[in-house]
Amino acid sequence: MDLFQRTARQLHDMLVKKEISASEITAAVYQRIEEVEDKVKSYLTITREHAEAKARQVDEKIAAGEPIAPLAGIPVAVKDNMCTEGIRTSCASKILHNFIPPYTATAVSKLHNADMVLVGKTNMDEFAMGSSNENSGFHITRNPWDINRVPGGSSGGSAAAVAAGEAIVSLGSDTGGSIRQPAAFCGVVGMKPTYGGVSRYGLVAYASSLDQIGPFTKDVTDMAHMLNVICGHDPLDSTSANIRQPDFTQHLVNDIKGMKIGVPREYMADGIAPPVKERIKEAIKKLTELGAYVEETNMPHTEFAMPAYYLIATAEASSNLARYDGVRYGLRVEDARDLVDMFMRSRSQGFGDEVKRRIMLGTYSLSAGYYDAYYLKALKVRTLIKQDFDKAFEKYDVLLSPTSPSTAFKIGEMVDDPIQMYLQDVCTIPVNLAGIPALSMPCGLADNLPVGLQLMGKAFAEGTLLRVAYTLEQNTDFTGLRPVIGGGAQ
């Protein structure tokens, strides 16, 4: 097996045994990037000099006989909406095409402190607004399983990089499914931690009450190690939860006997593609065989999650994106007639169509005369959705659903139909509204494309999700599947 195909845990064991060096792992990943990046297009910025220097530091520690952290020397990619001091952070937007942050996001600093090797910054839907990566201001990332299909969004670059072997692990952000949906489309493991579990300091905001940073990995073991690195309280983030962080690897237990799993019928409705339903039902059967008690349940307010989300998220986006005005940083048009003209032309030229659409929708919902009718009502619906989850978790340890209603769709198939694109997140959006953790993992193939299974848990119960996912993983072989770039699996 090539180095770029191995998991972080496998590479760590090889490093400790001195069978390989961190520099060789980094070189193997960059060789892989040279081979496939022109087809996949996962990256916006490559940080090779930075990565090679970090790898040498890890090799020096090993040579000196010093112990190394579990993810030391492991190549990691970071979504380009997380600030990196001295390294361009564009959010895949032309309005920030030249922005070099003066500081680093806390989550990225934690990667550095764990001696991980930053390979580069990955492509995304502009300002994390999208479900296909087609809204990037620079180029479209392609799905490693079929380069004619989307990798999902908005963290499509990070998911595709891990699936294609262009990084061993990566970070993305999830506002309404932007980690889980691309994880499902690309056949990798993706986790949205509990809101407040990972610092948002240095994450360029889309919707502040919904955004959360989380990892992409090849398997569940690597996911536990990544959560150990990035989770924890941060005084720089006022929404960061000040709770004791567990060792997530302690939850990698191959045993779910007696656990109760609920399957909300609203998540298995008519809009879910039949092949996706079949893979989910097969996973449910396997979990039952492994000793879990699985039954259907209901979440009565699920149907209102989509409209509530697109009012809350866009309202927050309209406020957060007001700072991009051509004055302090980013794009500023030349030859503006006056200040107002500069504002209008800078924002018109700098933002893409989807970003403009969401800003206008959010501004409208917050405007005088409409605030109570739209935004305030959406907040009340959000409370009802959270109460649905609270009630469900009184009975069940975990809730289960498809991650996405379909497998990866073709590039251009939905780009002119925003409503159909929004519906791709129908299974993931309620989790963000409730602020709870959720994990997507592969559960098989449909027409040679990965199908994602979503596990949802109560707040700060990431360990429970890891246990169920690990047990399913150990008794199936789906997370071991790797794409042949351009189509198929190996």
Image: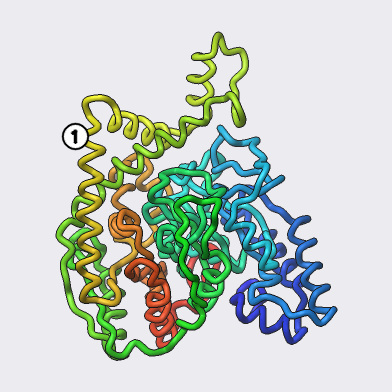
Pick the quarter of the image with the N terminus. bottom right
In the rendered image, the vertical position of residue 71 relative to residue 315, given as above or below: below
Q: Tag 1, which secondary structure?
A: helix
Q: Residues within 10 Å of mark 1 (few under 14, many from 20)?
A: few
Q: Compared to 468, does 426 lie above or below?
A: above
Taking depth in this image into account, of 288 and 458 the one nearest to the observer is: 458
What residue sits 28% from the left and 71% below the top? 399
- In the image, taking residue 55 as reference, residue 93 lies left or right, namely left
Q: Residue at x 69, y 64 (%)?
A: 117
Residue 149 visible to the viewer: no
In the rendered image, residue 243, in percent from the top left (x then y), is placed at: 46, 66
Query: Residue at label 1?
Result: 373
Pinpoint residue 471: horizontal percent, then vertical percent: 40, 85
What's the amino acid at mark 1?
Ala
- Residue 35 visible: yes
Taking depth in this image into account, of 71 and 279 the one nearest to the observer is 71
Horizontal arrangement in the rendering, residue 403 relative to residue 128 (left or right): left
Q: Is residue 59 above or below residue 139?
A: below
Tell me what residue is drawn at x 48 percent, y 44 percent: 205
Task: Between residue 271 and residue 103, name the one nearer to us.
Answer: 103
> Residue 34, image x and y in percent?
69, 59
Image height check: is 202 above or below 184?
above
